[in-house]
Amino acid sequence: MAPQDQATSQTANGFTAEEFEVEAPSPREVMRRRAKRHFGLIIGGSVVSITVVCAVFAPLIAPFDPYEQDLTRRLINPVWGEGGTWTHPLGTDGFGRDLLSRLIFGAQISLTIGFFAASIAAVVGSIIGMIGGYFGGRVDAVVMYLINSKLALPPILVALSVVSVFGGTIPVLIAVLAALFWDRYAVVTRSVTQQIRNQDFIAAAQAAGCSNARIILSEVLPNLANQIIVIASLEMAVAILVEAVLSFFGLGVQPPTPSWGLMVSEGRDFMFFKPYLITIPGLAIFVLVIAINMMGDGVRDITAPEGRN
Amino acid sequence: MNADAPVLECRDVSRTFMIGKGPFVQKRPLRAVQDVSLSIERGEVLAVVGESGCGKTTLAKMLLGLLPPSGGEIFFEGVPLSSVDRQAVSRRIQPVFQDPYSSLNPRKTLASIIGLPLEVHKIGTPDERKRRVEEIMELVGLPRRLLYSYPSQLSGGQRQRVAIARALAIKPEILVCDEPTSALDVSVQAQILNLLQELREELNLTYVFISHNLAVVEHMSSRVAVMYLGRLIEFGTAAQVFDDPKHPYTSALLDSVLTPEPQYGLPEITTMGREFPNPLNPPSGCAFHPRCPKAMDVCSQAQPQPTDENGRLLECHLYGEETAAA
């Protein structure tokens, strides 16, 4: 009983135990409170969620088959243009395909490639970075060499050459983009791990008999989760952009698959007569990338220990 | 294993760090710990005292098996520590660190922090582990409702209780406490010290208690080791060291203790006017001679040899044989 009395007396400096709990909300509660007040997170999160819902339920939402060509209805203007109809709210392209349906199905491609490329890069990059930061010395020198070699590669050129050899299928694109974007995770996780490594809780885990793998995964990794999520959101945006660029060059997703980048590329022929064919998918890419970035910033703000209000 | 052997014994333990990085920079040795020999008996509280930078923490890390000595050997019940499996060592020697803000993982709940050693050693089922964690939390005076709290929700004293609970979870025999109270408020310090005392009696623990606070040490310890610049300069029972300090450094340390009575003012520390020497460039001979009030010619020339008088170790020319003969 005696030790327990001490504990209550300790929190008794003007607070009862219950009040003390109110004073120190759990980290999750703090996050929830900050999230509710974070404007960027709410807007970015909503746009991303809407895009995800569209992508997942594309077959149900899209008014037309994105592959169905109808040359009698080609190049119809959007509703606000001359001769636009509500049947094709965003008009049709050069083959008479409904632009809105293609845009909705295109979200699937962009999100799939962006998400998987960013996630695979996150796993690879974080593991490399944590190993370098944790072990230091020669291991770290090897990791730094890998990172520097990667930084010396021109990403678009590498992507172009690899895709032109292996073909522009979605798995190849994901692999190439992941291989190009792991370095930022590695740089950040390495330096944060170096800081964490000197904390006493790592020594305590070692003294408790933990293996190095266990320390990296269960002591270091939880402290990196924030940073990894934030970089992942930024990298996902970049991956979506690069996919659009590759598709625009004709080396990404192959026609007639409705990728946003490919749609911009196909619209190029009509650029001066039907500019909406480029502006609409371009705008979609722009809005999604900005929304993902806003969401990433928001996640950083609400999870950062010092936090902004 | 030898039952008569001391639980832990250091024989001429040294640890040298090479300081300096880069291909064109000459690396310089920093002798953090030099030729330290001491033994720790079962059930005692051995205090290690000295200024910041004297090698206390390095010694603690070596005793925990986290850092291999670069010279000498540490024996655990007569067996060299380097030949014992780290897992086996970790079941019997556990640390309590100085800063409870850095020693608890901010992303984990108390349940998983305290339960970690149990999990690593695969002791019991998850249910049993949870019960053991609750038991140990009660033992160190943490209310059970904090089981799923995070360290950020606790005060400094509560955090240090968590660190103690984690150390005790697998029922170790030896606790290496590296300045367990120096990061805490004075009022909380007393609570933690009392807790450590109670636990020692209850669980029959052996403590290695590292501190720069002599008042704390006097309160806790049965034997005291005084370190200066990596060397063990005086070692004896608490009564010997506190009532009859032999080494001038020990006397100076004792003189520097602040008293609670303000009318006594600040203690006179004129004897140690000069600052702590650079460990990268230690003074010749006895490392303490530039600050020593009783320094003689021989002090700056020769390293004093340790003398052993019924287990009381001293390293000072004032008491060395060569001086006595001269």
Image (cartoon, coloured by chain):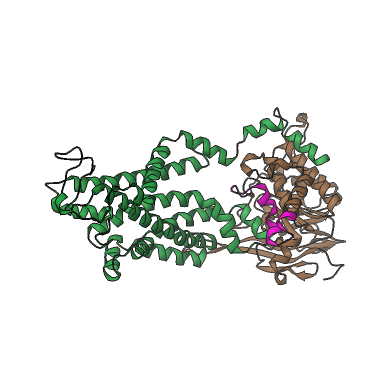
Does B100 sit above or below residue B33?
above
**For residue B122: magenta?**
yes
Q: Nearer the viewer, residue B41 or B25?
A: B41
Q: Is residue B48 visible?
A: no
Q: State which region is magenta.
A: B105-128
- B241 relative to A70 in the view: left or right: right
Q: Nearer the viewer, residue B286 or A205?
A: A205
Question: Which colour denotes chain A?
Answer: green
Q: Residue at x 70, y 37 (%)?
A: B185
Residue A213 appears at what percent x and percent y? 58, 63
Give the vertical position of B137 relative to B320 (above or below).
above
Q: Which chain is brown?
A: B
Residue A216: x and y, percent? 56, 59
Q: Residue furthest left?
A: A273
Task: Confirm whether the magenta stretch covers residue A169.
Answer: no
Tally the numbered discs: 0
On screen, residue A50 above or below A159: above
Residue at x 48% of width, y 55% of height: A189
Return the x and y of residue B274 as percentages of the image width and height. 64, 46
